[in-house]
Amino acid sequence: MAPRLTAVLDWLQERLGTREQFTRFLDRRLPVGTTWWHTLGSAALFLILLQTVTGFFLAFYYVPSPEHAYDSLTYIQNEIPFGRFVRGLHYWGASFVVVVVFLHLLRVFVMGAYKYPREMSWIVGVAIFLVVMLFGFTGYLLPWDQKAYWATVVGTHIAGTAPVIGEYLWRILQGGVEVGARTLGRFYAAHVLILPAILYGLILVHLSMVIYQGIAPTPRGPLARIRKEDYTRLYEESKGRGETFFEHLLRDAVVAFVLVAALVLVSATATVPMEEVADPTDTQYVPRPEWYFFFLFELLWRFPGEWIPVATFWIPLAAVLLLFLLPFYDRTTGRHPLRRPVASGAGAGALALIAVLTYQGATAPLPPREGAAMPQEATALPPALAKGAAVYEAQGCSACHVLKGTGTAAGPDLTRVGARRDEPWLKRFIKNPSAVQPRSAMPPYGDLAEDELDALGKYLASLR
């Protein structure tokens, strides 16, 4: 076996120069002051690779259809050897990835490592973080339980509130007038095909820049404030006194081992939460997102009604643009946090705000519920109005509206909407909200069948 392996390695050496490349990669020197915080990048890559491997396993058995998605996950958890454990690795690993990628981005910000010559590396890193968050969003629907279904209903409707592109975005995500088979298929395709291709492409570009530019030094001593023309000289001097990448790999290995041990412990002892199978007619269910979206969930309540796009579009857009453009408007020579007080202060303020909103979102009481009030009311209504109440439930209107104390307050309260608007106005508005009220954040329901639109209009007009 050894001679054959040697022959293979020699064959690769003759054509690729593998020994020289491997040696050059491991022997490259790092600047002085490389610390444990510099392991976060490799830790993030390790966790992403682990998510990919566990995702492959789940994809062998998962069936992306409303009829079989929930049962296929139940089968994985209860019938497949180690299925519950592997699903736990994937589920809890998603939170690990979000935390580690965020900490890596935060470390780069604190150390001023987004400055020359790493501006593009920072931009690609921010893009990687956004793609990781999109993995969390697209993974919502796949279990097809109550939380998955109704959180996706809210998420797609929120996407529909974006100005100009909202309607198109909503249609692309949802694939129809309600969350169903096409929605699940699109989310599955994005989660296992589109986003992985984008993510690994960005990682490849990011790694190539890190290898070419070197790891950013800790901003201390002469490296705490660097003029552009002095950077190369100071950085090379620091590398001359630093360790090799091979020596730094020991830290990376220790961190990877700790992460695996923690993830194995959590997966072996904690049960992956799974609720009842999705029921599109259960308008009493109040969805709540994963913890890393709590701050957006809480922000949504600060801007009700026609102000929803401020929370769902304008604030997130401004935050993303500020992150992407950070290296271009923070052009000071300071790299240590105390040498750039404006950027550090703004970052600390944003972090505090996210922490407060996350805490409030995690501890906020659920909106009031009235048990089976809606179904009971529907049975007591005349047939025409009962049909409208059923359409209201089937379309998930309570995900954005409160009706007699039931639902969420993202949109206007509809308890007495009939006292303000007549049936023709309501039908026109439901069909194309922006044509009736240009500033409306509600997505259009033009694909709703005419008899369903009539029934829903009559029902809403009866609410006085």
Image (spheres, rainbow, N blue to C red):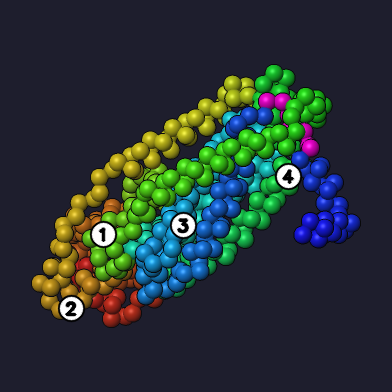
Q: Residue furthest top?
A: 221
Q: Which mark is residue 384?
A: 2
Name the residue that disc number 1 marks: 285
Q: Can you give x and y, in whole percent of width and height, for residue 219 in the image? A: 66, 25
Give the alpha-carbon distance from disc 1 to disc 3, as whole Å: 29 Å
Going from N to C along the chain, the mark reached first, 1 or 3, is 3
Query: 11 or 143, which is in the foreground?
Result: 11
Give the alpha-carbon distance from disc 4 to disc 2, as whole Å: 64 Å
Going from N to C along the chain, the mark reached first, 2 or 1, is 1
Q: Is residue 45 left or right of residue 263?
A: right
Going from N to C along the chain, the mark reached first, 4 or 1, is 4
Residue 319 visible within the image:
no
Secondary structure, magenta segment, majority class: loop
Name the residue that disc number 4 marks: 209
Query: 248 or 350, which is in the foreground?
Result: 248
Q: Which mark is residue 86?
A: 3
Q: Can you give x and y, in whole percent of width and height, for residue 244 in the image? A: 75, 33
Q: Is residue 22 above or below residue 71?
A: above
Q: Is residue 38 left or right of residue 296?
A: right
- Mark 4 or 2: in front is 4
For the record, the magenta segment spans 27-33
